[in-house]
Amino acid sequence: MNARVLLLLLWPFAASAQGFAGLGTETDGFATPQSPAIFDFPTDHGPHADYRIEWWYLTANLQAADGTPYGLQWTLFRTALAPEQGAGWSSPQLWMGHAAVTTLDMHYVTERLARGGIGQAGVTADPFEAWIDDWQLTGPDFDRLTMTASGPDFAYDMNLTATGPLIFHGNNGYSVKSAEGQASYYYSQPSYTIEGTLTLPDGDVDVTGTAWLDREWSSQPLSDNQTGWDWFSLSLDSGKLMGFRLRQTDGTVYTSATWITPDGQTTAYPDGAFNADPLSTAIVDGRTIPTRWRVTLPDRDVDVTVAAINDQAWMQTSVPYWEGPITVTGSHTGVGYLEMTGYE
């Protein structure tokens, strides 16, 4: 789910956008997801120009040799101004990249913007390559990747290897986002091992850990009564859990979740089965942000507390949001990532 929806729909109009205005607008000739979802790999690892929004979204929980935790983000967004291909400067495709590194006391973030059709950014499916300027996420296939990005005060160079299958959320990849039926195509590779080097102001740090990559595309993903979301990816001692809640104008929430067993079997959970309740907040860039949560999935006996390793993981980008690594304690232990949008 995530900030990707907000960013891609509002980015071209960020100066005039109010809150989440436009997220529930008509599809204006773009394709819309249909159920049942039918995927074609490796083609679907590449772009879908007939849909309005799309992303390749990777987060990683890392550790240095001394046990110090770090978080890492690499994201490429595509948005289309019109449902057509075009060529060169006439291409309606716009691209945006976000990269970040989170430490216990710092959050480094940078952004890149690019036009489609002129080689600045893009994605090819086979062999897989996603890039914007000199940032790259590339490999012979989707299971073996190298990843690079850099900003004014950080850089990283990583290698990733998948250790499990692709995971399809919702109804075999058709992920419903509202009671009105808005939906996206949504799958993940949540089982990468990752190793490499972070370059920070104090020097290089060799790290290892786990990474989670989300793929999602749609044209009208939200209802016009939805004001923001809270998205959790949790790597636990006995499985993995993806869950999100979409906050609505009447004070209710719409939820969805996927439980993933260690061998990659999945169970999808409909609205109401997954719960996330704020426990405490922090002041972040002048906003009150919940950075400690109680997360429950009663059907799997999950009752955990998730807490940010750094409350100040604010993405000060074209459309700002919060995203950072978390720890998990309680009925299960582990690590994960939390993304939150719509807090003003």
Image (cartoon, helix red, strand yellow):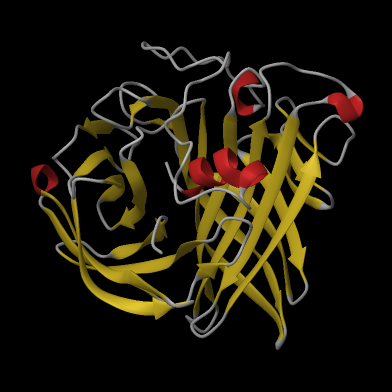
Q: Position of residue 245 (x, y in %)?
A: 27, 46
Q: Nearer the viewer, residue 58 or 226?
A: 226
Quarter assignment of residue 309: bottom left
| 85 in relation to 317, above or below | above
50 or 300: nearer the viewer? 50
Left of 249 or right of it: where is 61?
A: right
- Count the marks: how many? 0
Q: Residue at x 45, y 32 (%)?
A: 187
Q: Is residue 173 above or below residue 131?
A: above
197 left or right of 36 in image: right
Q: Position of residue 112 (x, y in %)?
A: 75, 54
Q: Residue at x 78, y 73 (%)?
A: 152
Q: Is residue 82 left or right of residue 278?
A: right
Front residue of 233/283: it is: 283
Residue 95 appears in the picture as rendered = yes
Determine whether 231 is above or below 82 in the image: below
- Residue 307 coordinates in the image, percent (x, y): 31, 72
